[in-house]
Image (spheres, helix red, strand yellow):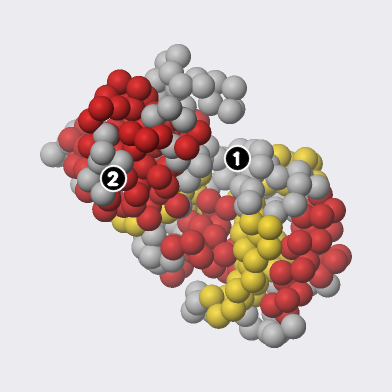
């Protein structure tokens, strides 16, 4: 019987009915409200919309935040209102079916491992490159959570001492140099120094707020030199981080997911080459296969539904 996976993000709640082949056969979405009750109402609404058309046995929620190891409560989610909230039990009571919680990057890693780019890998790592960096690690097909359920928080590895400020309170975190937010920040810095070289982004030089990752990607596709340089910088930092991760975890495959990977042709090959150059023991050890997501923006939905079905 199919299950429903729900990707609970900071701007939208996206739900899909997922069959046992990992295919999303129906979809619903709603805006993300800012209050707990309203958010749980929104989840109920999209799930009930799908249940009106399908019989399902379980629901999985993928959440961008810290989830308790027993997957019953959200401890903290920076872009959502839940704080130490027993979300699984509350939503199960509302919906009348078992509800499982999972960190969204873990869910995405499971989706890619079962049905996508990491299928069958013994040691698989997923990097979700979006506003920040999320990560999920699978060892022997099982999620690695660490001692307290919050591993691996790779986006906040400090790669530049006293570097760019991060919302986490520290400076120089990897995601400040390798994410959609980082791409925009790099472009703004480059425009301040080399705005005259820009053919597309130059009109945004006086309004940094107008420079977004999506805008930079559009400009790069148009051949804008500043936008292309910003992507080259992202590729370099991605390669550096991939090498660091490979030194620690030695994964068989690394899957790049998230919104930034829509622009993978602009940076992925350069990142792979940089990773291969700076990896410890380069030329004398196997390289991780670095792939982009096969499930696209449905990855966390598929993984959440799969985990819910397994626990039902």
Q: Badge 1 local density, few (<14 within 10 Å), some, or many (20+)?
A: some
Which residue is depicted at the point 52% across and 37% down? 153
The residue closer to the viewer here, 204 or 288, is 204
In the image shown, does 32 or 149 lie closer to the viewer?
32
* Marking on residue 196: none
Quadrant in the picture for the C terminus: bottom right
Camera-side residue: 203 or 219?
203
Q: Residue at x 69, y 85 (%)?
A: 53
- Residue 308 in sight here: no
The picture places residue 123, in percent across and down from the top left corner, at 39, 52
Q: Position of residue 270 (x, y in %)?
A: 21, 43
Residue 111 showing in the rendered view: yes
Q: Which residue is mark 2?
A: 220
Which is in the foreground here, disc 1 or disc 2? 2
Q: Quadrant of residue 212?
A: top left
Q: Is residue 59 above or below residue 8?
A: below
**Residue projecting furthest to the left:** 283
Kindly report the distance in space between the C-alpha atoms of the residues bearing marks 1 and 2. Answer: 35 Å
Question: With 299 as the anchor, is 306 left or right in this view?
Answer: right
Q: Residue 14's x, y, as percent? A: 62, 63
Quarter where residue 239 is shown: top left
* Residue at 34% from the left image edge and 57% from the top image edge: 292
User: Residue 250 appears in which quarter of the rendering?
Assistant: top left
Judged left or right of residue 269, residue 185 is right
| Upstream in sequence: badge 1 or badge 2 | 1
Element type at marker 1? loop
């Amino acid at each position: 019987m199919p299950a429903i996976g729900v990707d609970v993000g900071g701007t939208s709640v996206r739900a899909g009915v997922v069959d046992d082949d990992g295919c999303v056969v129906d979809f619903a979405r709603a805006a993300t409200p800012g209050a707990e009750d309203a958010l749980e109402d929104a989840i109920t609404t999209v799930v009930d919309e799908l249940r009106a058309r399908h019989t399902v046995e379980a629901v999985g929620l993928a959440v961008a935040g810290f989830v308790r190891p027993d997957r019953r409560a959200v401890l903290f989610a920076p872009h959502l209102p839940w704080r130490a909230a027993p979300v699984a039990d509350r939503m199960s009571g509302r919906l009348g079916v078992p509800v499982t919680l999972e960190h969204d990057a873990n869910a995405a890693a499971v989706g890619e491992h079962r049905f996508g780019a990491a299928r069958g890998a013994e040691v698989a790592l997923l990097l979700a490159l979006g506003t920040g960096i999320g990560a999920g690690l699978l060892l022997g097909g099982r999620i690695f959570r660490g001692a307290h359920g919050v591993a691996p928080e790779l986006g906040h590895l400090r790669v530049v001492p006293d570097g760019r400020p991060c919302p986490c309170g520290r400076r120089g975190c990897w995601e400040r140099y390798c994410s959609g937010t980082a791409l925009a920040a790099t472009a703004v810095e480059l425009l301040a120094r080399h705005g005259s070289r820009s053919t597309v982004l130059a009109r945004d030089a006086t309004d940094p707020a107008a420079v977004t990752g999506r805008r930079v990607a559009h400009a790069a596709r148009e051949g804008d030199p500043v936008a292309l340089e910003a992507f080259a910088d992202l590729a370099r930092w991605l390669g550096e981080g991939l090498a660091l991760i490979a030194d620690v975890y030695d994964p068989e495959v690394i899957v790049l997911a998230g919104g930034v990977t829509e622009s993978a042709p602009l940076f992925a090959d350069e990142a792979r080459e940089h990773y291969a150059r700076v990896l410890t023991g380069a030329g004398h050890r196997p390289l991780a296969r670095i792939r982009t997501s096969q499930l696209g923006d449905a990855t966390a939905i598929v993984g959440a539904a799969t985990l819910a079905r397994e626990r039902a």
